[in-house]
Amino acid sequence: MVIRKEHALALLRLKGVEKGKFCTVQETEKEPFVELEMANLARMGKPLEYVLTYWGEALVDVLKEMVDKGILPHPEKWDEEFRWVGSEIIAMIDAAVRNGDIPGKLAEEYLEERGFIEERKIEKKGTFKVVNDYGKAVYDIFQNASPRLIVSKELHDYIRSIPSGPAESSVLKGESRLPLILESMRLIAFSVPASDIYTFTALGCKVKEACELIPPALDVVISEDIMDTLAKCFDAGIEELNGEEKEVLWQLALVDDKGELLPAGEALLEVYRVWKDKESLPVKTINVEDIDAELLKAIEEVWKRHKDNPEVVPTVDELVHYLFYKPLKDYKHVMEHYGRRLYQDIGYQKKEEIKKKFSEVKTVEELFKSFYEKGNRWYVKLYDIVQESLYTLESFNLIESKDYNGKKVHYLTGWGKKILEDMETRGFRKISSTAVKAITIKNRVFGAPNVEWYEEAVAAQLVGGGEPTVAGKLYEEAAYAIRRLPHITRFELQVLHKIPETGFFVDDLYEYFDETWHEEIEYAVNKLEARGYIDILPNRAIVLTEVGRLIKRALAGTPEGFANPITPLGVRVLDALRKVGTLYVKEQKIRVLPKNLKEAIKLSGLDERTFGEELLILKKANLVGKNSINEAGLLILEAFDRLN
């Protein structure tokens, strides 16, 4: 849905027609009426005759009231390119509604210019600018007005000629009307706040895939009628179609002479399913840090050594040894991660001193011994770093810990092997949550990545030439296909506890921590989103997901001393205990008889020692009692179930 000056004037013109009568327009002025029809705001009777739909009537009533009350200038006074409503405006209103109606600094100016902002006093918080009832009314109309889907031969060729995005909107310049038709049908969306980036939506991508296969043999290549006919052929057989219907399907190469689907028909049937069901996937993402990628390689290398020496297996200790014997110059990409961990422990005020030390030492062992000289502390610190990264890798289903002759060892999963192959092919690099989300946000119907996300995706080689690269498609697929296990670090939990239900932004987090921790906050927020606990909206608002609420509630009483209050291995232990225990609904507990512990260990896939260590952590975190999983533990299990 897009409303510029010409569309607003067209709506007012249709409103002025006697009820039940159609408005006749000239051939030279039909374009905005066509776009209103595609958005289901106007309906065409005979050619060049239009009338308002129910939702068009609702929208023009909102517009007229805003003009009459002086909230908005009359459309005649608008600039020709002014977008009163567009996908980026809907995205800003949506982000505000999800965040307690507060749009934030990034979106406030744009919504205020369109008359969608008012001041409101919020108890115990003060006075804020929030989205008003007019903005919510437009949002409601957008959600309820189901757009048309009609692709002409001309539009078919245009869709094929442009990249699927995310890409800079300048790519679309030179063609004034066709992008408006695409946006009206919700096949493309523009970025917050100024439409600098565009992307094909999930439905748009399906339509583009179909257009690559359907020959432009007719004036109309895709329409509701054509899709209905194809579905009828698929469900009832080609013999149920009349001659004209068969001819259309054959000319568009959708079915063969027996009515069997051809590749173009399969693609269009998928378009029909997404369009008919209004399917919308959640926006998921994934994050791989430099140290994570290096450990994927380390696990593979240690298993290679195992072939020559069966005693060598990728335990945590063996992986620590692998890392600290390597020269720093061999993996400079990991240095930033080590630096961050040292800053955390020693203090960001010593950042320059730590940077200088990096240039002086040659191995990781030397680096950590420089700052942890007493006893064996340097080894413990490096061990903790490796273990935390291994937990993260397992939480994203990239590795799996298993019992190997009484030891906990690590194996690459299918996804871990694919990610490692990407790193070895395109270079070891950080894959941020927002870089992946620059691709997956297309599933939000009106979602497009803002400029910052897009640039991160390009830098990470996930987007190139205005489309997801092979790597981009890999991480997009992984974000939706991996089996996730809950995990959270101590600092991530501190950040999570600071996030309220609504009315919160990334910048608000900085007020709770010393300035030197800002870099660490960005890192934690990136991880929390990748884990599925928060959703960072295009206006930088932070919203807790349902899983995030469960995790936050479950760990409300957890002591702050834990490096990793929840680990994926701990969740495996909880899940195993659940399977051998008995649920007591009234008490909100699962009781586990001691005799069933051996079965639980077997079900967890862990060695007995690791199972015992993880069980002890669960008890100290107040998730498990002496012989039972308590309410907090049940909340973690519920979060685990919801994640998958």
Image (spheres, rainbow, N blue to C red):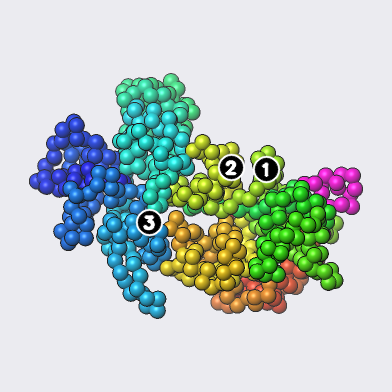
Q: Position of residue 580 (x, y in %)?
A: 69, 66
User: Would you name the residue on which mark 3 appears?
Assistant: 92
Asked whether disc 3 touches disc 2, contact meaning CB atoms under 8 Å apart, the reply is no
* Structural distance between the alpha carbons of marks 1 and 2: 10 Å
Residue 427: name its quadrant: top right
Element on which disc 3 rests: helix
Question: Which amino acid lies under the numbered mark 3 shown in the image of this protein?
Answer: Met
Pick whichever, 175 or 211, lies toward us. 175
Element on which disc 2 rests: loop
26 relative position to 147: left or right: left
Question: Which amino acid lies under the numbered mark 1 shown in the image of this protein?
Answer: Gly
Pick whichever, 503 or 222, lies toward us. 503
User: Would you name the residue on which mark 1 appears?
Assistant: 427
User: Would you name the residue on which mark 2 appears?
Assistant: 461
Q: Position of residue 564 (x, y in %)?
A: 67, 67
Residue 101: name its quadrant: bottom left
Give the number of the mark in front: 1 or 3: 1
What segment is highlighted magenta in the picture? 299-318
Q: Earlier in the sequence, mark 1 or mark 2?
A: 1
Q: Is residue 305 magenta?
A: yes
Image height check: is 221 above or below 270?
above
* Structural distance between the alpha carbons of marks 3 and 2: 28 Å
Question: Which amino acid lies under the numbered mark 2 shown in the image of this protein?
Answer: Gln
At 25% across and 44% down in the image, what residue appears?
80
Q: Is residue 264 magenta?
A: no
